[in-house]
Structure formats: C-alpha cells, structure tokens
Amino acid sequence: MEYTPISPFMRPISHAHLRLVERPEGSVSGRPVNKWELFRELSKAQATFGISERDLTVLQGLLSFFPNDALGENAQMVVFPSNKAICERLNGMPCSTMRRHLARLVGAGLLIRHDSPNGKRYARRRGDERVAFGLDLSPLYCRAEQIARAADAVREAEERARRLREVVSLMRRDLAALAVFGKDIYPGLGFWDQIHNTSLVTARALRRKLSLEELFAYRGDLQVLLDQARNIFDGPETEELSTNGAHSERHHHNSDKEYIDFEPALEKGGAVAAAAEPENYPDESEADIVEADQRLGPNIPLHLVIAGCPTLATFYQGDIRHWHQLYDAACSVRPAMGISASVWEEAQQFMGPEQASIVVVAMLERFSDIKSPGGYLRALTSKAAAGKFSCGPMVMALISKKNAA
C-alpha cells in the first residue's frame, strides 16, 4: 500500500505537492520574482490552473501578508495570518467562503499548508532558526516560469482571436459591399438580399465576445458566400466592369496633381494615441451598420491596389480577391517592414483596416525609398486622424509610375 504523508494537523499532503517542493517543474533557480507581477501573470492564466476570480482575491490577500515585494532570495515564504485577519483583509469575506477558496488554491498546487500541532498559524524562533506554521507560498514561486508561459499562451490566443475577429469583420463588410454592388449590376437576384441579411446578422454577432470556434465558423460561412458572389461577377462582363471601374477612378483622382511623396517630412508631435477597443459593442440599427460600412470603406477598387502593388505577390502567396485577404497580407508583411504592432493598431483605428492595409502594401512597393516605415505610417495616421488623408492618390501614383516605365 502506498503511504500518504500527513501534515501535523492531520491534513493529507499529496505526493504531487512533495514533488513540487523537492523538484519543481519550471523552477526559477533561486531568482527572485516580484510577487505582484507573478500575480498578474497568474490572473491572465487563471483558466489554465482552474482557479476563479474569487480564488485570486484570496491569494492577493495572502500575498499582502508577505512583507517583501520579491518572492525567493532564499527567504522563507510562509505567511501565518489567522482566518479572521485574512477575512478582514478581504473586506469582510465570510470565513467559510475564504476557507473554500483557500482549499482551491491548495488543490491547484499554488499553496501548501504548513500546520502547527494545534492547527494555529504562527512563527517562533528556535535559537538562530525561525520556524513558521501557516500557508507556504513557495509552490507559487516555484511555478513562476510555468505561470509566465501559460500567460503568454493566453495572450497569443487572444491575439489570434483579435485578428480573426478583424478578418471576419472585413469579410462581412466585403459581403455588404457586394450586396449593394450586385443589386446595381445584376438586379433581380434574390442572392443579394441573402448576403445582405447575412452581413447584418454577422454584424450583430460581432457585438458579442465570440469564441475562436464561433469566429472560425463565421469565417467559413462568409467565405462560401463571398466565393459565390465573386463567381457571379466572374462572367463575360468582368473585363468590362474592371475597365470601367479603372476609368472612373482615374477620372476621380488625377495622379499628376495628387502625387504623394514617399519620404515626406514627418509631422511633429507624433501620432494620436490609440483608444482602447471596447469588449462589448453598443447596439446599432441596420441604418447605423450600413452607414458605418460606407464611411469606413476604401475609396479605390481592390483590383487597382493589386495592379499598383505587384511586389506584394513576392512576399505573400495567398489569393487576394477581397479586402479581408488584403488585410491578412498586410498583417503578414508588416513585421518584416519594421512597423511595430502599436503603430499598425493606430493606423487601423484612424484609417480603417482596409485603408491601412492599402497604405502598407503601397509602402512595400516603394520600400527602398522609405527610411523609416514606422514613422512614415505614423505621420499618415496623424493626417487620417485629422481627416486630411486619402490612400487613392498614393495607389494612383504607383500605377502612373508603372505605366510610364
């Protein structure tokens, strides 16, 4: 029969806890760790360790009883407040509730009980040695690297979800634009009403925080409809439509007059600070959604962007037939161009994702002429924030240069 160690106050100590103390997985080799930074990392990765917000509240209270900011440094990491003191520190949490959350922290392997023979928590000196009975924080310290890795994994998953959400949002707007365009070109098809309604339903769903699985499902459904819409346009009239669109765009934007230099003097004062994106979205009517689609849409056809920026095909192998695919391409090449994530987020906020993507791929086309891509994009973002920027002339300048070569 396997022996189960027992604590002095008759509480069983698991072998997992003993192994954690003897040879902790992901130990930090005696390096001190700031207790509050470690707590924030654990808060981010709480689902990984199976603990709740209330469990974290109790742990935060226990950490406040540890006198030093850093765990480690060969210091004894036992805190010994009474249950009453802990509950007072937690703004009067009921003692039974506190004990329940304490047990969950112990069960998660983040604390170990070091009980005295009478079950009280206290510290005393025996000669030069200090002996403490209470709640040992050393498992939390020993798992610091494991906690940090788990927190990084959560942040990476959040970033994937954020990017996927943006892609779904762009696909929805592609679908809404195709519905309007399709009714003008091929009226009488019920398909346009179908995709218009789907775009509205998806817009309502995007007000909520969706899981990765839900976002993938929406992306798949939207891609099917986008491909169906594109197939309708890929008929005999496609060449004529493209030519007419190019003619209209050239008429609207005189590239000789509105040529944008690719190395302007950067404006002083930096770019406008980006605002935090709300997690829950306000209610919008159908008219609000349509108006937002029209307001944020780019002012140049996608086929002209692709025609003016052929270098993109060298660095991005995927098909680019819709705006959300251009966005994905811009996200892929942006890090290699030396544009930071914060500058990219700022550009999307004030230009819109599609127009920011156009600017990035246009910058890629003239990359050798741009000394500071991040600074250049920041300057254009400042103009966009002031309502003084349009990406159309930038693309038309590229097309004019290509035709003149």
Image: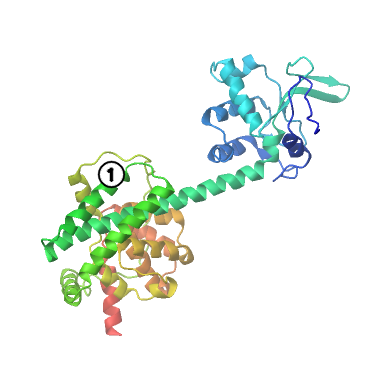
From the top left corner, tell me how far across and down residue 381 is, in percent.
34, 56
| Residue sticking out furthest to the right | 127
Left or right: 58 as drawn, with respect to 20? left
Q: Is 218 left or right of 124, judged from the image as shown?
A: left
From the image, tell me which residue sits under label 1.
Answer: 204
- Counting from the top left corner in percent of width and height, residue 339 is at 45, 61
- Position of residue 253 relative to residue 156, above or below, is below
Query: Relative to 104, does residue 239 appear above or below in the rendering?
Result: below
Q: Nearer the viewer, residue 12 or 204?
A: 12
Q: Which of these two is toward me, 225 or 316?
A: 225
Label 1 crowding class (10 Å Cα cut-off): few <14, some 14-19, many 20+?
A: some
- Residue 7 placement, left or right of 141: right
> Given the current orientation, which residue lies at the most extreme bottom position?
405
Q: Could you tell me residue 171's position as x and y percent?
A: 31, 57
Give me the residue at 38% from left, 50% from top.
215
The image quarter containing residue 147 is top right
The residue drawn where x is 47% and y is 48% is 158
Quarter of image, res 247: bottom left
Q: Secondary structure at mark 1?
A: helix
Q: Amino acid at mark 1?
A: Arg
Residue 103, image x and y in percent?
63, 25
- State the residue lying farthest toward the front: 1
Q: Can residue 269 be seen at all in this image of the molecule?
A: no
Q: Nearer the viewer, residue 109 or 79?
A: 109
User: Is the residue 358 above or below the residue 163 in the image?
Assistant: below
Q: Is residue 56 above or below residue 122?
A: below
The quadrant of the picture occupied by the C terminus is: bottom left
Q: Is residue 140 left or right of residue 330?
A: right
> Can residue 331 be seen?
yes
Q: Quadrant of residue 190?
A: bottom left
